[in-house]
Image (spheres, rainbow, N blue to C red):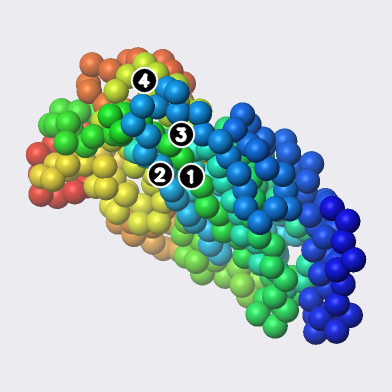
Amino acid sequence: MKTESHSKRYAQAGVDITRGYQAVEAIKGHVQQTYIKGVCSTIGGFGGLFELDLSQTPNPVLVCGTDGVGTKLKLAISMDRHDTIGIDCVAMCVNDVICCGATPKVFLDYLALGVMDPFLVEQIVKGVAQGCKEAGCALIGGETAEMPGFYTRNEYDLAGFCCAVVDKPKIFDNTSIKEGDILIALPSSGVHSNGFSLVRDVFNLDADPSILTKRYPSLKLSLGEELLKPTRIYVDAMRSLMKEVAVKGASHITGGGFYENIPRCLGEGYGAVIRLKDIKIPPIFELIKQVGDIDVKDMFNTFNMGVGMVLVFEASHVDTVLSIVKDAYVLGEVVKSDTAVTLL
């Protein structure tokens, strides 16, 4: 797109719109790699266009979700590594909408910076595009805002929005959940994108970010590399499962950990019983607990503890589920109870 748009006075105030055009050019290739059937617009328009094929969806319901990355961004900025944080942004949105059985179709991002740096924008959007490819959805639009005076030169914020579709009769129905149903865990890649205010406090990262380079005996990577691992995207796993078995309920384990999120997929009057010995807890959580002197309840009420998704199935389907998602495992079971989550 050719433009003669330029404001010398606006640039003097801190916003150089020509850098914005350069950033758009830098991200075009990454964005186009996400295009799937249905995309009918290109980058640069006022709105992203997507034509829905509803031939196999007689009663379509739109499912929309939005989220950000939180203060994990501070780690990316401290480490000057920005190519994976976009995956987190996509994951936090798509992992939510799949909890009702929906298929993500389109994604939009919002990036606000203190100074428009085309190379930085490209690195961030490269991650967003990678996340969209993993989720099988198209990045059809977004907004990049240069906001000097609101963010410092090295600061930025990132948020996303996704839209998914599900056939109404196929929406997960937690009214079918009963005592004896089994909870299946889909492992996380690590801390994902929640609890980083506590992580930063535990390791005193704001005062001494150099600790991010430290290597602990229990970790295979440096602390920073471990914490910056992108959030796992579960779209493919859910699609594979839904083709073979009936999913009764699904919870994305985000802020609030087990205690807040697992009850969201259970019916009234039912709770989850989980044995601590059955949870495959990655070393990073043990390290956080030890360094921060955090009790077990607070850990499970803040972090995912190695469990990114919890799914509910009939007991007779467990073997099939475990054969489809190779790293899934039995986490617990559903019981009649007024206590939402019981850790034994």
Mark 1 or 3, nearer chain start:
3
**Number of other residues with Cα within 10 Å of mark 3, as a class: few under 14, some 14 to 19, many 20 or more:** many
Q: Amino acid at mark 3?
A: Thr
In space, the residues marked 1 and 3 are separated at their CA atoms by 9 Å
Where residue 136 appears, as percent x and y from the top left, is 57, 32
Q: Amino acid at mark 2?
A: Val
* SS category of the residue bearing label 4: helix
Q: Are marks 4 and 1 in contact (CB under 8 Å)?
A: no
- Residue in the image at 79% along x and 54% along y: 24
The numbered mark at residue 321 is 4
Residue that numbered label 1 is attached to: 163
The numbered mark at residue 103 is 3
Q: Is residue 195 above or below residue 285?
A: below
Q: Amino acid at mark 4?
A: Val
**Number of other residues with Cα within 10 Å of mark 4, as a class: few under 14, some 14 to 19, many 20 or more:** many
The numbered mark at residue 63 is 2
Residues 14 and 126: in front is 14
Mark 4 or 1, nearer chain start:
1
In space, the residues marked 2 and 1 are separated at their CA atoms by 6 Å
